[in-house]
Amino acid sequence: MDGLAGTSSRLTWAVHISTALLVALWLFPTLGLLISSFRTADQISQSGWWASMFPSEQRIIQRAADPDEFRSEDGDKFIVSGTLFAPGTENEVIAWGTSSRQVDAYRPGDIADLGDGESMRVTADGFYSWRGNDEQLSGRGQRIFVTAIAPPEFTLKNYERVLLSGDSTDGMAKAFFNTLTVTIPATIIPIVVAAFAAYALAWMQFPGRALLIASVVGLLVVPLQLALIPLLQFHNGIGIGKGYLGTWLAHTGFGLPLAVYLLRNYMVGLPRDIIENAKVDGATDFQIFTKIIVPLSFPAMASFAIFQFLWTWNDLLVARVFLIDATGETTVMTNQIVELLGTRGGNWEILATAAFVSIAVPLAVFFAMQRFLVRGLLAGSVK
Amino acid sequence: MHPALQGLITIIIGVGGCIGYFYLSNQILDRVVFPPRKNDAGRNINRANAVRPWLFLLPAMVALGLYLAYPVFSTLWLSLTDRSQNGAFVGLANYNQMFSEAKFWEAMLNNMMWLIVVPAASTAFGLLAAQLTDRISWGNIAKSIIFMPMAISFVGAAVIFKLIYDSRPVDQAQIGVLNAIWLQFDGGLGSLLLLKLLPGIIVLSFAAIASYIGWIILRPLITGDAAGGALMVVARIAGVAVSAFFLVRSLILLLGVMSFSPTYGEPQQWLTIPFWNNFFLMIVLIWIQTGFAMVILSAALRGIPEETVEAAIVDGANPFQVFFGIKVPQITGTIVVVWTTITLVVLKIFDIVFAMTNGQWETQVLANYMFDKLFRANDWGVGSASAIIIMILVSPILVWNVYNARKEMR
């Protein structure tokens, strides 16, 4: 559409700005979660995540080191010195004080007169020196109130805790592998089953074909909510109960209509000549299918594989009904997060990290295979 | 055995079994049952070819029948029986019990609101995003980002938005974006514009659309040239009633917006404010579905013949006229498809409500109501009855899809 007559440059700017706004609005929520997952619990509760990108002002109360232990002689007086910040931090003092009534009485570098020759000095990098006589420098260390500018700080501790600690309430490692165990067979098996059926519906002649295609289209929209109780009864009846096998079968069944529909639509569009030539050359249907149809249908299979992967990875309902039993050994990530929302509703560092662990894999798949996803969407709904 | 290993073995058995089944059944068919030998050669080849499609279809048909078709009837039967009486037939008792529950009607009403707001907003935003990103150089990056929430689970999105809606006591720093913004409002002119005028205009325009649609449906009845017999008259009256209902609801809503006096300067618990919290939940789904609508509509916009747009520009149409007068009418079919697809998602919406409010504070929806009944109250009768309600709501789309698919195949 670029360069069309009637497209003024002012309008072009408006388009750029509105697009940027829209994109920011859509990115903002996920960004908040991502950034929160790299902050400590204290940081999260002290300021909104949007403030974490900029240096923040912090109030710190510290005591000078114990004078009875650390004081050293300095002429006729004693001196205690040290630093207020942990090594490695790059905080900068902007104001300080020695009483809670006036926490910002002095600038960095000032010398505070504490009376009778006792004095305190704090520099911008957090270094303090406290001078006084024998009596003044005894007992507990002098309190120092510091207002400091702290640079943005991020940590990987949350990920360590969620992924590596093995903690049964916070840990996601087990749930991660359980999710993977559900997802991979539940993605591959329906493709195999659907591919054969789609070939039959696309290229074989038999009575009732149109009816079958129509019923696949109809089954596309049947809500899986209807299947919960009857299938649970069925699974209990044949003795597989709650477990992986039942979940794989359920995902296969629920994914099949879309798989058959997408693959059939794609296969119908393959060139007739190739298939008929192969038939003339004496190839059987099975050979045509494995040697010609499957390699040519790869893009459609990839599209469906992404759909099914995202759907099974992100699913909560099927897992809760068909997989997770009372022991909770087979919990999946979505369920683990819902439970964290209940038990750790306020601990955003754990929640954000756990949630991000669960959405990282689908996001990676999404960005790597976006092309196939778009193609599948277009084939699945636009006609 | 480790589940991962078990999974691997299942993949091998499942995939290998499928391929083995197809291969062996074909071999048996060709070699043993109908071997093309001697006098029967021609006839046997034909017979084998008549059976073969069913070999290819069998696993899929069994799975579809068992996992989707059979449960529809089984659920229908469960909804007519009582589990506590050993599955005795009780007629419509479960439905009667369900219809007498306030929570069910709350779920129905909320679902209707979801049905109107989410598809409309997602399609509108999707159309906007498609049109905007089509014209600029970094459009593909913008599209990727708007499309990205499609990959995020409903549960993940629920966590993301819970952080946005988070509320802290008034003396602490707000870590939820919405409350941080809310505290900027002080009841001045800006608050009046953004919190009264803007929602007022949105609600008023919705009321206008509802009454306009109602009028279009009603007009033939008044002028007396309604075609199509008694059934159409009944349908028209029903349509008028529905639009009148929405008109009244939106006027009540408008009154609510105008008389609403918020307490400025106080952080709000967004998800516990009855009625409005539904919209905070809907935003999550709109955020997810807009990308889908954008992708489909963007492809449709690209498919519009360039000449029609150029002709309009030559005739002096401005960009807005081109968009609404030329482009949108040409992609109406796609808009309908997007709308119905999102409608299907909305009808089954469960995870978002389950994870964020679990139906408390008047946010119940049908699927969560059903889950409550089936697995918490263990009342299979009422639970199945509500599942059947979802099925009934879905079935017009089912019929429409099948009708279109059949039309296309002819």
Image (spheres, coloured by chain):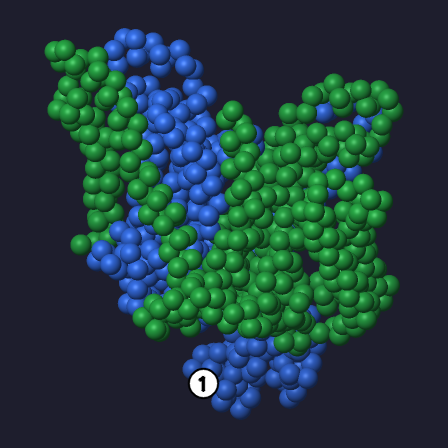
Percent x, y of residue A141? 52, 83
Q: Residues within 10 Å of mark 1 (few under 14, many from 20)?
A: some
Res. B126 visible in picture: yes
Residue to which mark 1 is pinned: A68
Q: Is residue B309 above or below residue B41?
A: below
Res. A111 visible in picture: no
Percent x, y of residue A86? 48, 66
Q: At x 73% / y 57%, what residue is drawn?
A: B241
* Chain seen in green: B
Q: Which residue is at the front of the view, B399 or B335? A: B399
Q: At x 26% / y 31%, what residue is drawn?
A: B55
Q: Secondary structure at mark 1?
A: helix
Percent x, y of residue B291? 59, 42
Q: At x 60% / y 38%, what residue is drawn?
A: B337
Residue pushed farthest front?
B230
Residue B378 occupies which quadrant of the picture?
bottom left
